[in-house]
Image (cartoon, rainbow, N blue to C red):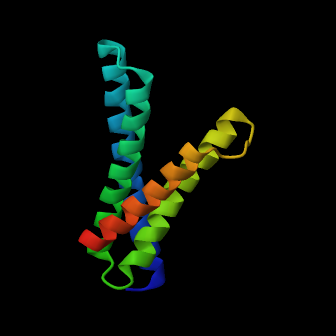
Amino acid sequence: MSIGKKIGVVIRGLIISYAVTGLLLAALALAVYKLKVPESVTDLAIIAIYVAVTFLGAFVVGKKVKEQKFLWDLLLGILYIGIITLAAVLISHTFSIPNTANITTAFLCVGGGLLGGMLS
């Protein structure tokens, strides 16, 4: 498989990841609204969603890309959290030094990508 096709597979994996993220975050928003879920639980649920969807996207990529799966799944995890971070910066119009929670979330997303590659 050529590099161009592998990049296309990674982009498809990202699209799948973001589509599922949207659905799960919408469901979480509904649960927060209806059930009055505390903020601490909501924060953990958001991180769990991020990790689960990077795992899912990487699993899909790993099934399609047979060689150097870890490299492509690592790329998916980095791009996923990088795009979310970029969107947050563009929306807030400020860039602050990331706190430890954001750094931990980034590492968890990359780890979710790598795990998806391992198990695919």
Residue 104 percent coordinates (x, y) = 51, 51
Looking at the image, which residue is at 66% across and 46% down? 98
Residue 119 percent coordinates (x, y) = 24, 70
The tally of labels here is: 0
Instruction: Name the quarter where the C terminus is drawn.
Output: bottom left
Farthest-out residue, front: 100
Looking at the image, which residue is at 65% across and 35% down? 91
Looking at the image, which residue is at 49% across and 58% down? 107
Residue 107 as seen in the image, left or right of residue 46: right
**In this orientation, does residue 12 appear?**
no
Residue 106 percent coordinates (x, y) = 52, 54
**In this orientation, does residue 114 appear?**
yes
Check the image and report above or below for 66 versus 101.
below
Looking at the image, which residue is at 68% across and 41% down? 90
Instruction: Name the quarter where the N terminus is drawn.
Output: bottom left
Residue 118 as seen in the image, left or right of residue 72: left
Check the image and report above or below for 92 versus 61.
above
Residue 18 as seen in the image, left or right of residue 116: right
Residue 118 as seen in the image, left or right of residue 80: left
Q: As rendered, which of 52 and 11 lies closer to the eye?
A: 52
Q: Quadrant of residue 21?
A: top left
Q: As rendered, which of 109 and 75 lies closer to the eye?
A: 109
Residue 117 percent coordinates (x, y) = 32, 71
Check the image and report above or below for 50 versus 56.
above
